Amino acid sequence: MDKLYEQSETGCCPRFNPGPWDQKEVTFQDKLFVKDRVRSFLHIPLNFGKVMVRNMEKIQAAGALAPEPLLLSDENSLWGADVYIAVAKEVPGAQMARVSGTFLTRVFEGPYQNVRRWIQEMKTYVASKQKQPKKLYFFYTTCPKCAKYYGKNYVVLLAEI
């Protein structure tokens, strides 16, 4: 397993540093991801853990862990979301995707019930930069168990501009 994960206090998700992500402009050029789909009910994921375990096993077996964790979620339906797990190289047996674009980012902290407010704040932030959001991704920085352990539930919103 990658040193970043081994060195984390939980042995799972590393502690998240919001500084490099808050109110930044980030550009991806053909950034490589494993792509999968999570079933949801009214945006509440039903099989997220199973999807993550399945993909992380493939990623680890391929020695493809990304140097920095990045999990993007495209909440494109009430009934499901596309998830993108950043990887260092192609992963056999996984659906691969490449993402390119420029994104404005904001870090939010708190319970998921605040997502609607975060989305509105993100739209206001993007508008303040005289930009229009094309697409919105959610970067869930830690799993729920690690968020509880760290005492912070950080979520980064990335607005493609």
Image (cartoon, helix red, strand yellow):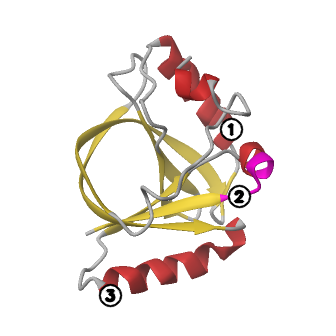
Q: CA distance from mark 3 to mark 2?
A: 27 Å
Q: Is residue 40 above or below residue 112?
A: above
The amino acid pointed to by label 2 is Lys
Residue 132, image x, y percentages: 27, 80
Say how many tags the image has.
3
Magenta run includes residue 7? no
Residue 33, image x, y percentages: 37, 36
Q: CA distance from mark 3 to mark 1?
A: 36 Å
Q: Is residue 59 above or below residue 25?
A: above
Q: Is residue 81 above or below residue 47?
A: below
Q: Secondary structure at mark 1?
A: helix
Q: Find disc 2 in the rendering and name its residue.
A: 152
The amino acid pointed to by label 3 is Ser
Q: Earlier in the sequence, mark 2 or mark 1?
A: 1
Which label lies toward us, 2 or 1? 2
Q: Which mark is residue 106?
A: none
Q: Find disc 1 in the rendering and name its residue.
A: 49
Quarter of the image with the C terminus in it = bottom left
Q: CA distance from mark 2 to mark 1?
A: 20 Å
Q: Earlier in the sequence, mark 3 or mark 1?
A: 1
Tell me which corner region of the image, top left, top right, bottom left or bottom right, holds residue 159: bottom left
Q: Nearer the viewer, residue 81 or 25?
A: 25
Quarter of the image with the N terminus in it = top right
Name the residue rendered at 27%, 82% in the picture. Answer: 129
Q: Is residue 32 above or below residue 160?
A: above
User: Dot 2: within a 10 Å radius of its alpha carbon, few (fewer than 14), some, or many (20 or more) residues?
Assistant: some
